[in-house]
Amino acid sequence: MPRRTLRAPPSAGASAERAAAGSAAGGAERLFQVSGRCVGLGSMSLAHQHGCLRQLEFPSPQHLVSCGNQNITAPPTYNHPPEGSGYHGQSLYPDGSGCNGGEAWDAWRFFYHEGATTMDGAQQAGCTPYTSGLCSGADVNNNGCRTCAAFDSCADTGKKPEPVRVHSFGWIMEEDLPPREGNDTHLPRPASQRKAMDRQVKKMQVEMLANGPLQVCLDDYANFILFFNEHPSGIFNSTDGSPNIGGHCIELVGWGIDRASGLPFWTFKNSWGGKWANSGFGRFLRGADLCGVESDVWAGCPYGSSCRLTAGVVHNESWVPGSSEPVIGHRRHASSALRPSRAWPGGREVELTREQLSHGTVAPLVVEAVRLATGDESLTKSEALARANRVWSRSARGLRVRVEVEGVKEHVVGHRHAEGHASFA
């Protein structure tokens, strides 16, 4: 296996940050970034001063969204479920819906049973370039607008891919933390759950120090994108009354305490590009479970690595969706929960109430969408909002709204991009 390179985040203001790079060996194993791999026709056949053409590579989402979805019932390539597991040829990824979202456990299960092919940092080259981002309209087949075919050879070399896989994966969840159902994640967990929250945070920190970054899925509120456009080095610590616009997943890479404010924080890496927040990194309030950031926590170890999940991680490799068994993992710590707090499907679409679509973080997109649909730029804000019959939102590299306009057959989509500009279609 090639070496993995762990890149520490840039400094995010005055802080006592403890980067996940504190455990270089384990952390480097889990970043899934392949550094210095030879690409092209062969290691010595290219005229290059080092004997090969080297390229940074990352797991491509394309293989996952096209092949790790509810349509796929083919038996797995690796780690076939054992006899008696409840596997009878059903889909192993029942919640996977391509560009329409999915659950974290399906994505990790895909890494376990299939693995992901790779792409370059620009997502446009490498073994499997990512093309689903170019989809226009809805992903009606829930497969990223591409069938699960032609992934058995690399687009750049024609050779068989070397998939990025995991040999183990699971979640971190404290047993004494009740599930966060409903839309209450704009509030911190109550003081009565403080001791359990402290244990949850400690388990996350232990795993991060031992093995590197964690994946967390959360509720994305409409002020999240705006906050970091206006305060790149700030600490997100309030939803400011903005509506929940959907689910999103980020990567925790470190933690610390801000010296100026005394606020404890996580340092996270997002997938919205280097122009958002602090070169793509940001800081998030730690220990309050704001937006559910500490309630849907996942970790995995790359196949062929020396990484071993710590005791606070509940293993989930053996569970088969659709079996008679509930979602249960292999617990190795007495206070670990046998299932995550609740499902946070990334990419899910949420229908907004009248009050929510009129909120200052959402209303400008809705108003412009209505004016575009009606062809009437003279509509006032209140008139335009009144013409919006229904509005759905989604976290999609920013905020995306789909608007049903009174008297207009086609829905209009407005998108506030991570960089701050808006577009409509």
Image (cartoon, helix red, strand yellow):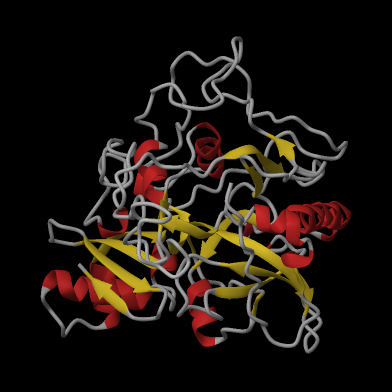
Q: Hey, which quadrant is residue 45 in on the image?
A: bottom left
Q: On the rendered image, what quadrant is the C terminus found in?
A: bottom left
Q: On screen, 398 above or below 95?
A: below
Examine the rendering and report whether any part of residue 286 can be seen: no
Residue found 18% across the figure and 76% down from its top: 371
Q: Is 145 on the left or on the right of 215, as rendered?
A: left
Q: On screen, 78 above or below 207?
A: above
Q: On screen, 265 above or below 95?
A: below
Q: Is 409 on the left or on the right of 299, as rendered?
A: left
Q: Position of residue 82 (x, y in %)?
A: 60, 15
Q: Is 400 on the left or on the right of 377, as rendered?
A: right
Examine the rendering and report whether any part of residue 404 can be seen: yes
| Residue positioned most to the top | 84
Q: How many marks?
A: 0
- Residues 221 and 279: in front is 279
Q: Position of residue 239 (x, y in %)?
A: 59, 71
Q: Position of residue 407 (x, y in %)?
A: 13, 61
- Residues 283 and 161: in front is 161
Q: Position of residue 55 (x, y in %)?
A: 44, 63
- Residues 39 and 86: in front is 39
Q: Is 69 on the left or on the right of 146, as rendered?
A: right
Residue found 74% across the figure and 62% down from its top: 24
Residue found 32% across the figure and 74% down from its top: 365
